[in-house]
Image: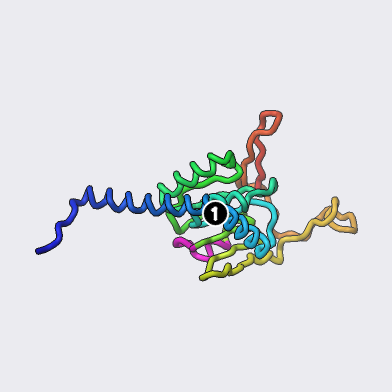
Amino acid sequence: MRPARLPFPLRDSFVALVAFGLTFVNAVRAAENPADSIEQAAAVLAKADVRAGFFVVLDKQDPEFAKALGRSDSAQVQVLLNDEAAVDQMRRLIRTGGDYGDVSVDRFPGEQLPYVDNMVNLLVAESMAGVTMDEVMRVLVPNGVALVKQGDQWERHTKPRPDNIDEWTHYLHDPTGNSVAHDDVVAPPRHLQWVAVPDGRGTTTGWPV
């Protein structure tokens, strides 16, 4: 006798329920062991040697890790997850602690990261989730770092700084006081790199590139 099969609507609902249950369990486990997550975040920051900027966490369902990663006032963290139920659950857990804003969560269907070129200072990937390393390098700033989980270790990747981008170390470029940089990349603005929240004057600031 063949085992009875669930009708398609019930089968899909059952699969979705199981996925939500696993997501809930993973998030709750992380929330119940914050010390482990905080320790792991500290180890990641030490290995990356990045302390400030825009951080992205890819495919890691750990709200405590994300909050610990963005504990500095100089960092903002965005977590990208493929599963919508996981996104909702992490958002609720982060909001419960009053940390949502500097740490945010969004759904990511895979392949192309939702950022302009040269925006991310640190990307931490529990798994690559369909993203190529070329795509990771596209969104990293020059000298930006990506840490990708390989077994129990984090593999470090650094985006090289192009030779045609100059350093601006002094008020007028360099010790000579000549305010002309040797930079082949600088050009008239073509788009906004980012937009900040309104300041005290009620205006919104951005960085044109």
Location of residue 48 with respect to 106 vertically, above or below: below
Q: Position of residue 9 (x, y in %)?
A: 22, 48
Q: Nearer the viewer, residue 135 or 83?
A: 83
Q: Can residue 143 be seen in the rendering of this structure?
A: no
User: Which residue corresponds to the image point at 56% horizontal and 49% vertical from the top-left?
Assistant: 78
Q: Is residue 40 left or right of residue 183?
A: left
151 within the magenta span = no
User: Which residue corresponds to the image point at 70% horizontal and 30% vertical from the top-left?
Assistant: 200
Q: Is residue 203 left or right of residue 171?
A: left
User: Which residue corresponds to the image point at 58% horizontal and 58% vertical from the top-left?
Assistant: 36
The secondary structure type at the circle numbered 1 is loop
Start and end of the magenta stretch?
127-137
Q: Residue furthest right?
A: 176
Query: Type of residue at label 1?
Result: Asn
130 within the magenta span = yes
Q: Is residue 208 left or right of residue 134?
A: right
Q: Residue furthest left?
A: 1
Q: Position of residue 164 (x, y in %)?
A: 71, 63
